Image (tube, rainbow, N blue to C red):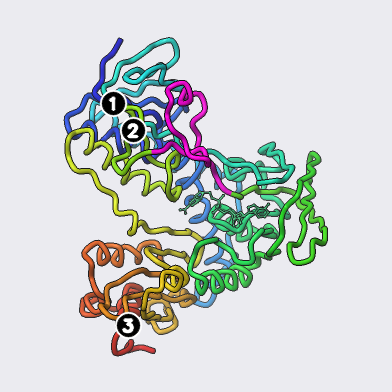
Amino acid sequence: MAQYDVIVIGSGPGGYVAAIRCAQLGLKTACVEGRETLGGTCLNVGCIPSKALLHASHQLHEAEHNFAKMGLKGKSPSVDWKQMLTYKNETIEANTKGIEFLFKKNKIDWLKGWGAIPAAGKVKVGDEVHEAKNIIIASGSEVSPVPGADVTVDEKVVVSSTGALELPKIPKTMIVIGAGVIGLELGSVYSRLGTKVEVIEFLDAITPGMDAEVQKTFQKLLTKQGLSFTMGAAVQSVEASKTKAKVNYKLRKDDSEHTAEADVVLVATGRRPYTDGLGLAELGIEMSERGQIKTDSQWRTNVPGIYAIGDCIDGPMLAHKAEDEGMAAAEVIAGKHGHVNYGVIPGVIYTHPEVANVGMTEEQLKDAGVAYKAGKFSFMGNGRAKANFAADGFVKILADKNTDRILGAHIIGPMAGDLIHEICVAMEFGASAEDLALTCHAHPTYSEAVREAALACGDGPIHM
Ligand code: NAI
């Protein structure tokens, strides 16, 4: 029986990062993973494969819509779906193998199999029980069923994000249930590949919780790209045959019943914590009503020596939030001061244009009664964006009306997912909008739009 300082359960972005940081801090570390490859949902069936398909389908979109305008003439490429899936699978393999390499480099043992915790200090994998002074649970999340509806996912005709990354052919029609991150990213992929995509959403706005102005612009741009939206519609049931599925829904405004039909239905109505088989009830680990493991501010559960991070605890289900918690929990175990600033966790949607946000929305600031100013700058005034046919969207910076301290930022536009990070750094340093505005930004870059939005919080932008 092996003895460890730390055993991490789960090798997703939370778990593998925690394991690497533990090893770097001199702790003898193992990581339990039951999948054939490391990396969890994110690398195997989530972030990474979806980004490969988003990238490939965006290239097609560029070829179809913008190449001729730039003087690049000729037939647009046709889609070899099998090869696109191979490219996606190779991307997954390169990334999961990369984690395997990092485990070897850091002398982390991969305990292959599904882990359970028979008692504090013990982790059972298969028939073997391993001892660990500390255990970090990083078991992630799974697709949650459509609330209050009769929907069975068969991963053929009615698919989750996992099945949507593996469809045997590009469907002619697709219904996406849920206008959240997964629905819009994968809906965009298929729409660009020629599928007629209809999104059915319970609420009256897409991407719940996001800045309302961004929501409206985003929906308009996606509609222009060919996606259609049925809003305020509660899906009641899905009836699937071998080749088609019918989605029955009720419009909330008048309770009227409707049916829509498509070759494939993608269920994207959220995820829930995954803790099956760990034996948490027997251990007496406290859980929330939403099935999350309860932790204190140092990621400790109520059972000494057992920590939890990532999607299986409270907070946004984001790979980078899990990574930060993984590093911080490792530092706490090593006797250091692990910390995560939950007020500065960016969110990104990798559609085209991208959408990114950090900090408070205007709606949250109004609710909290905070006096704020909004500095906005459209990509129409950004030379680089215009040259690249990427001038849709804007940067909006929200700053305290009295102190000018940056409180939040909302970007829809080219490379929004990268641009957001200069604002994250600024927020970590407690910067004012003026600090950003006074920072020289190279010309011509998309990042000038961020500076102009910061200028708009003061005396005004130059190019608007
Ligand atoms: P989500 O919570 O983002 O969106 C689900 C949507 O489904 C909501 O708009 C909700 O109102 C709607 N809905 C719920 N029940 C419905 C019904 N009966 N009929 C119609 N609509 C209904 O969930 P999603 O997109 O499945 O993503 C799951 C998690 O994965 C999220 O926490 C997300 O942040 C994370 N994720 C993050 C990504 C990123 O950072 N780029 C990419 C993919 C996932």
Relative to 4, does residue 162 appear above or below in the rendering?
Answer: below
- Is 21 positioned to the left or the right of 135 in the image? left
The reply to whether the C-beta atoms of the residues labelled 3 and 1 are less than 8 Å apart is: no
Q: CA distance from mark 1 to mark 2?
A: 8 Å
The residue at 31%/46% (across/down) is: 324
The residue at 25%/67% (across/down) is: 426
**Amino acid of disc 3:** Cys
Residue 442, can we see it? no
Q: Nearer the viewer, residue 210 or 286?
A: 286
Name the spot of residue 266 as percent of width and height, x first.
66, 48
Q: Nearer the viewer, residue 365 or 345?
A: 365
Q: Earlier in the sequence, mark 1 or mark 2?
A: 1
Badge nearest the viewer, 3 or 2: 2
Name the residue carrying label 1.
134
- Is 390 positioned to the left or the right of 434 in the image? right
Q: Nearer the viewer, residue 86 or 300?
A: 300
Name the spot of residue 281 as percent of width and height, x first.
48, 25
Q: Earlier in the sequence, mark 3 or mark 2?
A: 2
Q: Which portion, as a residue range, is magenta?
A: 270-294
Badge nearest the viewer, 3 or 1: 1
Name the residue carrying label 2.
307
Which element carries disc 1, helix, strand or loop? strand
**Amino acid of disc 1:** Asn
**Amino acid of disc 2:** Tyr
The residue at 72%/52% (across/down) is: 235
- Is 342 positioned to the left or the right of 390 in the image? left
Relative to 114, does residue 425 appear above or below in the rendering?
Answer: below
Q: Earlier in the sequence, mark 3 or mark 1?
A: 1
Question: What predominant SS class does the magenta segment belong to?
Answer: loop
Name the residue carrying label 3.
457
The reply to whether the C-beta atoms of the residues labelled 1 and 2 are less than 8 Å apart is: yes
